[in-house]
Amino acid sequence: MKKIINIKEEKVLRALRGFFSRNNKMPSIRELGKELVKFGLDLKSTKSIQIYLKKLEEKGFIKKNAERKYDFIGVCESLLVNIPIYGGANAGAPTLIGEQYLQGTLKISKSFLKGGKEDDYFAVEVSGNSMNKSLINRKKVESGDFVIIDSGYKEYKGDGSEKVLAIIDGLATIKTFKNIDGEMIGLFPESTEKKHKPIFISQEDEFIVNGRVVDVFKT
């Protein structure tokens, strides 16, 4: 049966989608209220917002999960994709083993893939604070965050604009990637703590640039 929603309900649904696409989570009632203003819908009370959410739930566009929070269903699920979470990476010295086993999955909006192949993307959890001054999509890379890695990215410029996941002797670290000269690569921290130092690698060293960091999801 065709699902029919009115103009205001459609605005609420578009606001939910827009917020999720930018933040990879559903908004709180207050956040949704602010988002709705962008769509020309200024609902003054939380009760009014909850009424619209209930209508969208009844019409099969959203549903409450086990935590009593809303998730998309139906046509909206086609906007989402599950990517694997592999091992962990240290935003500090490379002291965590870059173990390649599946720890779970992370549901994200397809818009984060930027048209790339789904199989090229995976997530790792950050440990340490050597990159807490760096910004990716205006978000800092902090301990406990999940970063999204594009392993299909090949056109590295090495000019310091790219944050990468590097595996050095089996250990994983996240750093800013720079070409020093034709024979040396630098992996640089961007931290509030001066104890973190650059890592310099020659072409003879055992290392892999496993992908570019393309986004950060705060925990």
Image (cartoon, grey):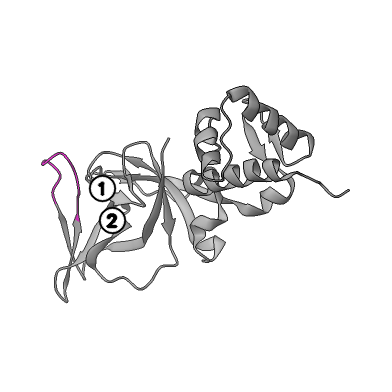
The kind of residue on which mark 1 rests is Pro
The kind of residue on which mark 2 rests is Asp
- Per the rendered image, the range of residues in magenta is 188-197
Q: In this view of the protein, can residue 33 be seen by the observer? A: yes
Q: Is residue 149 magenta?
A: no
Q: Earlier in the sequence, mark 2 or mark 1?
A: 1
* Residue at disc 2, secondary structure: loop
Q: What crowding class fits label 1: few (fewer than 14 Cα within 10 Å), some (14-19), or many (20 or more)? A: many
Tag count: 2
Left or right relative to 156: residue 218: right
Residue that sits furthest to the left in the current view = 194
Left or right relative to 162: residue 59: right
Q: Is residue 168 above or below residue 219?
A: below
Q: Label 1: which residue? A: 94
Q: Label 2: which residue? A: 169
Which quarter of the picture shows residue 119?
bottom right
Are the residues tagged 2 and 1 within 8 Å (C-beta)? Answer: yes
Q: Is residue 193 magenta?
A: yes
Q: In this view of the protein, can residue 64 be seen by the observer? A: no
- The quadrant of the rendering that contains the C terminus is top left
| x and y, in percent, of residue 58 in the image | 78, 34
Q: Nearer the viewer, residue 171 or 81?
A: 81
Q: Is residue 34 above or below residue 172?
A: above
* Residue at disc 1, secondary structure: loop
| x and y, in percent, of residue 134 in the image | 25, 49
Residue at 58% x, 24% y: name it: 45
Q: Nearer the viewer, residue 99 or 41?
A: 41
| x and y, in percent, of residue 209 in the image | 33, 63
Residue at 52% x, 40% y: name it: 37
Marks 2 and 1: which is nearer the front? 1
Q: Nearer the viewer, residue 133 or 165?
A: 133
Residue at 59% x, 39% y: name it: 41
